[in-house]
């Protein structure tokens, strides 16, 4: 009897632990942590090694490693804040792997798009990946429209973030040069990648409480 009770308690504990881990956006938190560490302890030599530049198109790691770099603290905080906001709910609903694939696809699209549309620009920052995940919310909504709550709020939030970012950069022309090619490439690929990587849920999932916290 004691053995069966102990096994039952252990099973419940494992189930609770699994549920808690499911709530934690492991991918985007891990990426954000690496970005912070590199910003704090990274040396100029590392910065030059990781940034994306037309002078080093043969260095294949640069097509993604530039996303780990940021020009200053404001740039870092803005990107990390937005990417955690837009990616955390998707990680809960679609999983870390699928959300991570969209983020990485957007970053890769940003570097390739910049190399074609603005080839003389050196680039750092995670904005292409952020825009990819942001626009992939639309893909997620289309795929699961019948099974998601707060659909209108989500769509309004995506449009508001995009519009606000564009207006801010237009109204502040003295800011460091913005790679519009990277933003646009990441956004387009993120929208398309969402249809490729995201799943269509067969029934309504139990994440209403989390959505209320997230969108209210």
Image (tube, helix red, strand yellow):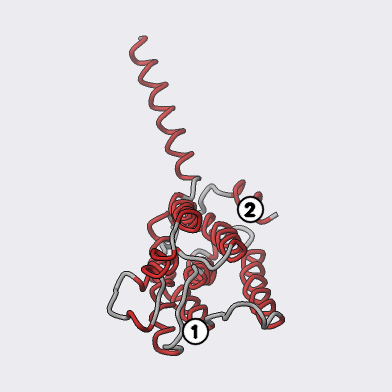
Q: Which one is in front in this view, the residue at disc 2 or the one at disc 1?
A: 1
Name the residue: 65% across, 49% down. 213
Residue 103 location in percent, x, y?
44, 66
* Position above or below: 188 against 157: below
Callout 1: few (<14), some (14-19), or many (20+) C-alpha neighbours within 10 Å? many
Of the two numbered discs 2 and 1 on the same chain, state the one appearing first in sequence: 1
Residue 31 location in percent, x, y?
45, 56
- Report helix, strand or loop for mark 1: helix
Real-space Cα separation, disc 2 to disc 1, in angstroms: 30 Å
The quarter of the rendered structure image containing the N terminus is top left
Looking at the image, residue 80 sits to the left or right of residue 168; the answer is left
Residue 142 shows in this picture: no
Residue 6 location in percent, x, y?
38, 16
The quarter of the rendered structure image containing the C terminus is bottom right
> Picture quarter containing residue 8?
top left
Looking at the image, residue 155 sits to the left or right of residue 197; the answer is right
Numbered tag placed on residue 214 in the rendering: 2
- Report helix, strand or loop for mark 2: helix
Residue 212 location in percent, x, y?
66, 51
Name the residue: 56% across, 80% down. 178
Name the residue: 42% across, 66% down. 47
Numbered tag placed on residue 3 in the rendering: none
* Position above or below: 20 against 100: above
* Position above or below: 176 against 130: below
Numbered tag placed on residue 181 in the rendering: 1
Looking at the image, residue 48 sits to the left or right of residue 77; the answer is left
Callout 2: few (<14), some (14-19), or many (20+) C-alpha neighbours within 10 Å? few
Q: Nearer the viewer, residue 6 or 75?
A: 75
> Picture quarter containing residue 73?
bottom right
């Amino acid at each position: 009897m004691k053995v069966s009770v102990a096994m039952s308690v252990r099973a419940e504990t494992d189930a609770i632990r699994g549920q808690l881990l499911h709530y934690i956006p492991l991918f985007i938190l891990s990426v954000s942590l690496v970005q912070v560490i590199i910003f704090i302890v990274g040396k100029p030599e590392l910065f030059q090694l990781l940034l994306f530049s037309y002078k080093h198109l043969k260095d294949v790691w640069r097509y993604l490693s530039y996303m780990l770099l940021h020009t200053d603290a404001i740039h870092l905080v803005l990107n990390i804040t937005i990417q955690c906001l837009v990616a955390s709910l998707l990680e809960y609903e679609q999983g870390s792997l699928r959300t991570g694939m969209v983020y990485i696809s957007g970053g890769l699209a940003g570097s390739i798009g910049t190399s074609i549309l603005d080839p003389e620009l050196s680039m750092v920052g995670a904005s292409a990946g952020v825009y990819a995940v942001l626009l992939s919310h639309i893909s997620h909504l289309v795929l699961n429209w019948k099974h998601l709550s707060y659909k209108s709020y989500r769509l309004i939030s995506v449009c508001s973030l995009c519009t606000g970012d564009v207006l801010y950069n237009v109204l502040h022309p003295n800011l460091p040069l913005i790679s519009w090619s990277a933003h646009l490439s990441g956004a387009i690929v993120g929208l398309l990648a969402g249809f490729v990587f995201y799943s269509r849920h067969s029934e309504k999932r139990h994440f209403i409480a989390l959505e209320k916290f997230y969108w209210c």
